[in-house]
Amino acid sequence: MPLSTQLPTPMNAFTPLRTLLRAATLVAGFTLAGCATLDGYTATTPPSPAPLRGEFGAFVEGLWPEARAKGVSRATFDRAFAGIQPDPSVVALTRKQSEFVQPIWAYLNSAAAPERVAKGKAAAQKYADVLARIERQYGVPRSAVLGIWGMETNFGSFTGGKDVIRSLATLAHEGYRGDFFRNELVVALQILEERHIARDRMTGSWAGAMGQTQFMPSSFMKYAVDFDGDGRRDIWNSVPDALASTANYLKQHGWQPAAPWGVEVEMPHNFRFVHRRQSLAQWAQSGLKRAGGGALPASSAEAYLFFPAGVRGPAFLLTDNFIAIKAYNSSDAYALGVAHLGDRSVGGPALAGRWPVTEPHLTKQQTEEVQRRLNAMGFDNGDPDGRIGTKTREAVRRYQEKYNLIPDGYPTPALLERMRLASN
Ligand code: CA
């Protein structure tokens, strides 16, 4: 039984048994998710809930004109917010994003941990037919779909038990990330209005991502598909719907059927960093080989070199399909986790390269210093946050190129020392 932070919604006198269960679960502090499927589908009008009071109530009421303009009825609106208060645990979670703070090898080790890979292989087998149909229809390989499913919910084992309306309302009320969550909240109301899911079953992550592959409400509206043919786009309970929706998402974000996401590579000795981006065939001519042995995939797809932990660690060539995965979550570590877990789930090998675990690494504070120094030298990489994201890697790479260093885009203590000395 999934635990839920959900507060009760107004009851209609539909099922006495359900009412009893609801009353019982109120005492226990959780709801029985499976017992509330009829909310939102019944023609019975529920009694009007009491309006929310206080500053949060005023915030919610302030959403009404926008919701109404988007076609949300007052009944849906009131039922959505009945009894809702901000969720303090959601506010606390806004300060955590593990893919940025863990070293990448720790992140990838847990992304493709043996038990998870075993689960992925079992899922690949169980849904082989569905995945084959998805590949044919969307041109997205099963590995990518499985990778996202595994990274998002461990293949459906944890889809998040938080009340999506409450989470989104909390984040919107906080003003977290500008208007992003406020907009998602209004779309969530539209989803309820269109009866894609019952109010009580609209659960998800603390950030409002829903279902097997964790779609935000706006992604649901744009990309969710009905693949099992029952007339509903049910990303919460239908694995075929959720996986096809994910493939559709990747396709709409530019997935190229003929290209891999990328490949782990081995650099030849005395490799010259002349090219930034060229076709896989040209990279092969430049002397790159598949890590662990073998030729690169024969493909005209363009790819760029990527060193997640610097030139002393594993190296990858990444195509635009990797960028499509990053549309799901912009972290390089996340996208690499998706790609690698997906490959492992369809029988691919473990990574061949060694991570530089014993090399000195920058602390968060030192990374911030590198970022500040890069900005001061004109290598813009946004607000210093102590996280090595795409912008910082790119700025480091340009700095390294300018000073004839190996342009691996990875800041180290030695690089910081160099910057400090140069500024004296
Ligand atoms: Ca369906």
Image (spheres, rainbow, N blue to C red):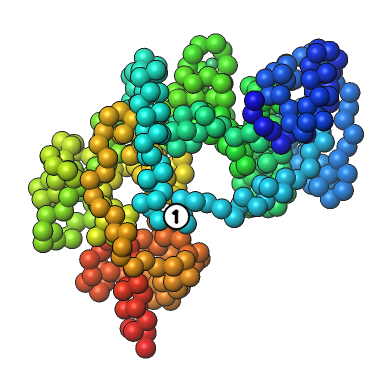
Q: Amino acid at mark 1?
A: Gln
x%, y% of residue 389?
A: 42, 57
Instruction: Tell me if mark 1 has few (under 14), some (14-19) or many (20+) residues whose alpha carbon lies within 10 angstroms of its own.
Output: few
Q: Is residue 219 something that shows in the picture?
A: no
Q: Is mark 1 within 8 Å of ligand 1?
A: no
x%, y% of residue 160?
A: 59, 34
* Residue 131 vs residue 151, the one in the foreground: 151
| 392 to 139, vertically: above or below | below
Q: Is residue 46 shown left or right of residue 118?
A: right
| 327 to 274, vertically: above or below | above
Task: Identify the residue at image location x=64%, y=44%.
Answer: 181
x%, y% of residue 391?
A: 41, 59
Q: Quadrant of ligand 1?
A: top right
Q: Is residue 168 something that shows in the picture?
A: yes
State the SS at label 1. Answer: loop
Disc 1 target residue: 102
| 398 to 70, vertically: above or below | below
Task: Identify the residue at image location x=87%, y=48%.
Answer: 54
Task: Identify the residue at image location x=37%, y=88%.
Answer: 424
**Exactly how many numbered labels are in the figure?**
1
x%, y% of residue 155?
A: 46, 29
Q: Residue furthest bottom?
A: 424
Q: Quadrant of the N terminus?
A: top right
